[in-house]
Image (cartoon, rainbow, N blue to C red):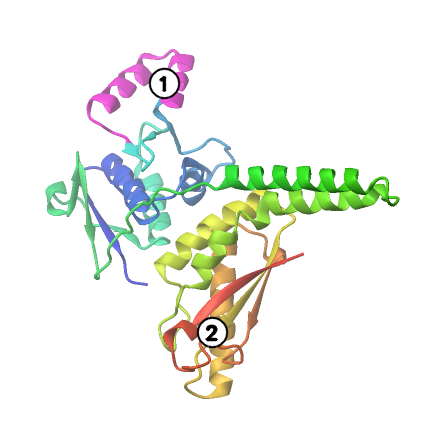
């Protein structure tokens, strides 16, 4: 796959920081946990360490104080002075937990970066790139334009309020009916379960579902768009917090072309979404299933050739 970002730097240390910054530019919703999963220290050092590669500046300062060594103190102050850290879109500053980048470790870092279409351009002058910062710069390749980070709007408070109002309404109705008929206790419990169940995850992913189900594919191809990958990243976080959630991903095509080809293409589109969730987000494959619908369920029946018919949708399985 063609590279999307090239990193220029004058040393291995700054090149490693540039690779992390490139990943943040490509995935602006990534957290420090996401970065440590994408670039695990255990892979770069080939050890069984559980230590992360990146921590916040505040956490790094605690580690330095705990070590009580002049070496760490001097490096920490030098890193702050030279701005040897990256910043997430939410303003969180991150530093490496390692002070040195030996050749073998840096080669593993470059190999890991290639998994995300990031390449390193030897040791050339940092000022050659488009995005300049300190001792490294970034250049966007092959027409790639990084996404602009958007603030996520939380609707949790609204669902909590609606759930509370619904419970109050149920209790009022039950009190009014108490003198007229016998109410079985389990009826109340069933209603409570439904409210909590919806509040936990069904309502949380409603907006994600709309955004993903609207993602269209290029005619005749099964490649996921960058917008679809961002939505799948958010969806994976919901699944990680709710291990009971299972999903069916359904691929669809428009009506042009051979029916057999359309069926295989729709299966490939659904499988592409499943593979991304498993390989890039760490979701267990047993919680996902891919189904191809071909052109049997058109979104726009008035125009069977319309681009919105080329899509992949996900359905929550109980």
**Residue 182 visible to the viewer:** yes
The reply to whether residue 279 is in sight is: no
Question: Which one is in front in this view, the residue at disc 2 or the one at disc 1?
Answer: 2
Is 150 magenta? The answer is no
Image location (x, y in percent) of residue 243? 62, 46
Q: Which residues are magenta?
A: 58-85
Mark number for residue 61?
Answer: 1
Q: Is residue 115 left or right of residue 282?
A: left
Above or below 63: residue 292: below
Picture residue at 47% right of the left edge, 31% below the top: 51
Cα–Cα gap, marks 2 and 1: 54 Å
Depth check: give the residue in front, 261 or 128. 261
- Quarter holding the C terminus is bottom right
Look at the picture and state if 209 lies above or below 57.
below
Pinpoint residue 147: horizontal percent, then vertical percent.
Answer: 29, 51
Location of residue 304 with respect to 32 vertically, above or below: below
Label placed on residue 188: none
Residue farthest to the right? 182
- Measuring from the top left, give residue 46's x and y in whole percent: 45, 40
Q: Is residue 71 magenta?
A: yes
Quarter of the figure with residue 193: top right
Pointer 2 and pointer 1: residues touching (CB < 8 Å)? Answer: no
Q: Is residue 232 left or right of residue 243?
A: left
The residue at 35%/47% (across/down) is: 27
- Magenta highlight: main SS: helix
Residue 105 location (% of width, % of height): 35, 39
Earlier in the chain: of badge 2 and badge 1, it is 1
User: Which residue was labeled with disc 2?
Assistant: 299
**Mark 1 residue crowding within 10 angstroms, few (<14) / some (14–19) / many (20+):** some
């Amino acid at each position: 796959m063609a590279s999307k970002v090239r990193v220029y730097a004058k040393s291995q240390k700054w090149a490693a920081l540039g690779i992390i910054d490139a990943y943040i530019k490509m995935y602006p919703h990534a957290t420090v946990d996401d970065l440590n999963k994408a670039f695990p220290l255990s892979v770069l050092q080939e050890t069984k360490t559980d230590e992360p590669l990146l921590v916040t500046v505040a956490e790094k300062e605690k580690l330095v104080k705990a070590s009580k060594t002049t070496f760490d103190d001097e490096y920490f102050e030098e890193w702050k002075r030279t701005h040897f850290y990256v910043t997430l879109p939410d303003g969180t500053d991150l530093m490496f937990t390692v002070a040195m980048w030996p050749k073998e470790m840096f080669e593993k870092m470059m190999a890991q970066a290639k998994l995300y279409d990031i390449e390193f351009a030897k040791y050339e002058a940092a000022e050659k790139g488009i995005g300049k910062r300190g001792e490294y710069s970034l250049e966007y390749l092959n027409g790639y334009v990084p996404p602009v980070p958007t603030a996520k709007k939380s609707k949790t408070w609204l669902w909590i309020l609606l759930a509370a109002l619904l419970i109050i309404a149920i209790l009022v109705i039950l009190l009014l009916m108490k003198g007229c008929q016998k109410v079985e206790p389990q009826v109340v419990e069933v209603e409570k379960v439904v409210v909590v169940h919806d509040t936990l995850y069904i309502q949380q992913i409603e907006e994600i579902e709309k955004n993903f189900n609207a993602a269209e594919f290029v005619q005749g191809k099964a490649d996921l768009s960058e917008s679809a990958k961002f939505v799948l990243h958010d969806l994976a976080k919901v699944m990680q917090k709710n291990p009971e959630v299972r999903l069916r991903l359904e691929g669809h095509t428009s009506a042009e072309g051979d029916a057999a080809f359309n069926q295989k293409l729709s299966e490939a589109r659904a499988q592409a979404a499943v593979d991304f969730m498993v390989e890039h987000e760490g979701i267990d494959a047993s919680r996902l299933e891919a189904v191809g619908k071909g052109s049997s369920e058109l979104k726009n029946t008035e125009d069977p050739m319309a681009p919105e018919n080329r899509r992949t949708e996900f359905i929550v399985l109980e």
